[in-house]
Image (cartoon, grey):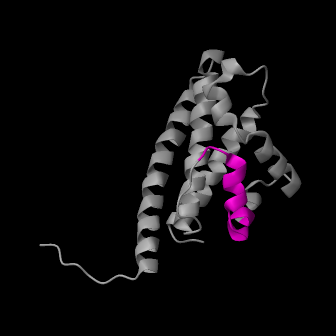
Amino acid sequence: MIVPCKVSKKDKKNKINSDFAKAIFEEAQYYYEATELLEEEREEDKLFPPVIMNATFACELFSKAILYRKSEKEIIKGHSLKKLYDCFSDDVKIQIFQLFYSMSEEELTKFIDDIDELFEFWRYRYEYCSYSTHYSFVLEYMKVLNEVTKNLMNGKY
């Protein structure tokens, strides 16, 4: 038997966002792991597009998990890594920046600007003449977002 209980709208929203954040984080982990496996096998360039696609999608999902966990957004749509980053609270941005040891804050935001629509580009790359990938940065950003999200889910922030 399910017994209903009175829950305030705010508590209900926070519970939904927290549960949703956890589900998104778990999904992001699958893309993270797939990226790692593909990267290990990427001796040929033919695996380059799936590595980039999985990595950028993992970045998107980690970003959305952070935003839902922090209850900063109700509905989050789109693939823009820049827009998602811009929605982060200052404390999240600080955590991300601290994990990029050898990069200034300006460099970090420049790289995020550069990879903003990378997911869409690689899905439809035949429609574009050229695009910057910053391959190493994308992989590192994915790892950093994984770490920040994991810490957030475990209550460290």
| Residue 50 x, y percent position in the rendering | 57, 26
Q: Where does the C terminus fall, quadrant-wise?
A: bottom right
Relative to 3, residue 100 above or below? above
Asked whether, in this view, residue 20 is left or right of residue 113, the answer is left
In magenta, the rendered stretch is: 78-94
Most foreground residue, 151 or 61: 61
Residue drawn at point x = 84 percent, y = 47 percent: 110
Most foreground residue, 97 or 15: 15
| Residue 134 x, y percent position in the rendering | 77, 34
| Residue 44 appears in the figure | no
Relative to 39, residue 152 above or below? below
Residue drawn at point x = 30 percent, y = 84 percent: 6
| Residue 49 x, y percent position in the rendering | 62, 24
| Residue 82 lies in the magenta-colored region | yes
Q: How many marks?
A: 0
Most foreground residue, 13 or 67: 13
Most foreground residue, 135 or 60: 60
Relative to 53, residue 90 above or below? below
| Residue 35 appears in the figure | yes
Q: Place residue 38 in its image quadrant.
A: top right
Relative to 58, residue 10 above or below? below
Task: Tell me which secondary structure the magenta stretch mostly adopts.
Answer: helix
